[in-house]
Image: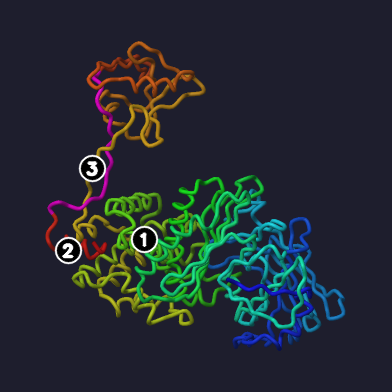
Amino acid sequence: MLKTIKTTIYPILLAITLFNMVVGCKAAQSETKTNAFPIVASIDLVHIVDDKVKVEITVNNFDTDTISYYLPKVVPGTYQNNNYGKFIEDFKAFDVLGNPIYVQKYGDNRWKINNARRVQKITYWVHDTFDSESTHDVFSPTGSNILENKNFVLNLYAFVGYFDGLKENTYHLFIKHPKALKASTSLVETISEDTINTPNEDVDLFVFKRYADVADNPIMYSSPNRVTFAVNGIDVLVSLYSNKESHKATKIMEQMERVIRAQKNFLGDINSTKKYSILLYLSSSKSDDAKGYGALEHNTSTIVVLPESLSPEKLREALTDVVSHEFFHIVTPLTIHAEEIHNFDYNNPKMSEHLWLYEGTTEYFSLLFQITQGLITKEIFLERVLGKMEASKKFDNTMSFTTMSKNILVEPYRKNYRNVYEKGALISMCLDIIMREKSGGSYGVLDLIKNLSNKFGIDMPFKDKELIKVIKEISYPEISEFLQKHVVGNAPIDYDFYLKKVGVHYGVQHLPSSYFIFEQQPFVTGSEASKEVVFTSGIVYNSFLKNLGVLGGDVLLSINDKKYNLKNIYDLFGDSNQWKIGDEITFKIRRNNEVVTLKSKVIEPTVEKIILEQDPNASAQQINLFKKWIND
């Protein structure tokens, strides 16, 4: 667990002294750097004013006349313009005597400071995003929360910015917080010997080698509700905030340990991190609380936002889905990433071409590991594959994936972003099947990722335009051909062609249905205007209604002489439960202003569902390849 610094001295007063005290705080060298000293930042979580926290940045010896300070417009993993500078107010700069220095704001995220050589500190106040989501588009897990004396969700890029040319400087971050609230993070605290205890406040110190590490390491402060466990060399922290205390971390630990252990077994010797933190914020879902449910990946942690109203079982299910995806980001983009990500420009971002790799392969792994590690059945796995095939049809299937990735922040590419989780995963599935076929089942997409991890690494990014060439060298020419045709090019993918290689084809499953509803989808609806019962259009009816001859838009008048309308529409469900198989049934409906009588016998209602299944006539080669694919 993390240790807490105990001190009464406000961090800024310690800053200059600690320049020379903290071990390992030398700043990394950069050609653009103008200042070798660390950037010292302080966040005060004790003295909250109007739901805002104060941030103070201490600097030393600027050797330029003017300098600009920025909050990010975009951060890695968000793929949209959030403009975190919009949540900053009362930005001021001061010299060593406390005299104000002129500051001019440009746009949402930049403050230009004149007479920079005189600057000793800057201060500003930060609003959180959770309680004002109706006024902006910041997705909750990418935002921040300020809930005095209860909870603070700190995506640090929303609080601490960077100076132009100094992103490679070391950062010292002091966080002053109520003693009852503890920090949950993958960061390791730096301990200072020169501290003083107080009854109600603590100060934590974290050191970062560059701004990218500040942006990549979230912290959540709350009353301790957390568990830790070790899985195959990784220390895992699960920290949970529940305002009503209706959920406990201990209740989800077993499921999280089971999932992450399976993921580590799947990854094998890929071991890019020693720590991983799951920071879970459970929202009240009220108007002043987070409503964007989901997660944001960081290299060694993830912030998850879910509704507090979930039952314990549903919470475990939701977390399993989230962690199944987010945890695999320790592989990509942590270990495998382009120069555009490694040297990310937070205000003029140049996006990488390879979202199919960062998000698509990650999403594919989140499916594949569950079947290879025995967490789900073959039927469920194939159902999820089919679900992605169907979901991908909602997007532009002729759009180059690399072009989309490179331009993901603008339309029409942005509206296709969700396809990285659908078609992106299917791209990796096809690559996997191709490599399994070429290698006789011994080499797949996981092996490709392992080889890429060995060639590149956390501190060795690849060049965007050279990745496919490298993949060709360490796999097969057919892989390069596929990527050039379907990822760089805009040719749609024939998924049936690749699934046939592993002996999978389409089948039909007959599922039991109620007479007027199937899986929360009613076949009838009530018209408020006419007060009539109308059969729903645009959906597939069950076998009973098909056999009867009902069409979408038909108005139901009566069944066996009992009249139905908006007032007694729910009687349909109760009355139909009394029907007996083989009974005569008579519907009167109105179709195109004409009354029509439909007669039939009551039959067992079923709904046809298209599924993916193993072909019973598959060849021995197809069967063997299928087994190698899913580790059967």
Q: Which residue is mark 1?
A: 425
Among the 4 quarters of the image, the one containing residue 160: bottom right
**Where residue 170 sits: x, y (%)?**
64, 82
Q: How many marks?
A: 3
Q: Is residue 501 left or right of residue 520?
A: left
User: Quick check: marks 3 and 2 in contact, CB under 8 Å?
Assistant: no
**Secondary structure found at label 3:** strand
Q: Which amino acid does the dot numbered 3 rest on?
A: Val
**Where residue 97 sits: x, y (%)?**
87, 80
Question: Which quadrant: the N terminus?
Answer: bottom right
Q: Is residue 610 magenta?
A: yes
Q: Residue 272 or 113: which is nearer the viewer?
A: 272
Q: Which amino acid does the dot numbered 2 rest on?
A: Asn
**Where residue 501 sits: x, y (%)?**
19, 61
Q: Which residue is mark 2?
A: 624
Question: Which quadrant: the C terminus?
Answer: bottom left
